[in-house]
Image (cartoon, grey):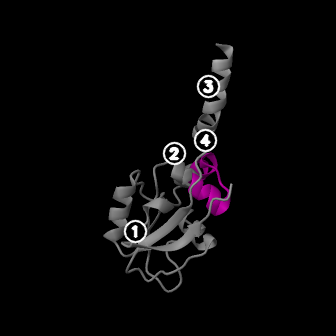
Amino acid sequence: MKRFRLLLALLLFPCWAALSAPARADVFVVVHRDSPLRELTPSQVSDLYLGRSRSLPGSEAILVIERGQDSSLRASFFRLLNGMSLKQINAYWARLQFSGQVLPPPNFGDSKLLLAAIRSNRLAIGYIDASEADDSVSVVLRLRDTQ
């Protein structure tokens, strides 16, 4: 019986390890396919998502769309973009809101709603898991997860 349990544990360990490992996913920053934006730097995207800028040179005001406050994709996005944790980014926005300087971007927890909002507004920007990209949006930045 002990041999059976040991064998079962050895067989199931890789499955358990894969399930308990943090999810790794590339994140795509996307815009409407007719957007004038074609490529953005991580610094430009960071400035938009941290409320430091509302437009880019040569463009109109951009509608920044955010994910749910505690979503794993949001955690990956900010970690890959500028090394910030969810705790840090939430504290950052709490300070800005308290000071009355800037309101955070609207939240769309669901990818389908976020993509629908981007498809309906040529000045919208958002981020999605790389697996959700299709030809209805243009990818302006790829954040690769190398961990």
Q: Label 1 is placed on what type of residue?
A: Asp
- Residue identified by numbered label 3: 8
Locate residue 25 relative to residue 64 in the image: left or right.
Answer: right
The reply to whether callout 2 and callout 4 are in contact (CB within 8 Å) is: no
Please name which of the two marks, 3 or 2, marks the residue nearer to the observer. 3
In the picture as drawn, the residue positioned furthest to the bottom comes out as 58
Neighbour class for label 1 at 10 Å: few (<14), some, many (≥20)? few
Q: Label 2 is placed on what type of residue?
A: Asp
Residue 134 bears which disc, if any? 1
Give the distance between the C-alpha atoms of the residues marked 3 and 2, in whole angstroms.
36 Å
Q: In what quadrant of the picture does the N terminus appear?
A: top right
- Residue 94, image x, y percentages: 55, 49
Give the distance between the C-alpha atoms of the residues marked 2 and 4, in whole angstroms.
22 Å
Image: 54 above or below 68: below
Q: Secondary structure at mark 3?
A: helix
- Residue identified by numbered label 4: 18
Label 3 or label 2, whichever comes before in sequence order: 3
Give the distance between the C-alpha atoms of the residues marked 3 and 4, in whole angstroms.
16 Å
Q: Secondary structure at mark 1?
A: loop
Please name which of the two marks, 3 or 1, marks the residue nearer to the observer. 3
Q: Magenta part mainly helix, strand or loop? A: helix
- Residue 45, image x, y percentages: 56, 69
Judge whether residue 129 can be spotted in this image.
no
The residue drawn where x is 67% and y is 59% is 146
Q: Secondary structure at mark 2?
A: loop
| Part of the protein shown in magenta | 76-93
Locate residue 62 relative to residue 72 in the image: left or right.
Answer: left
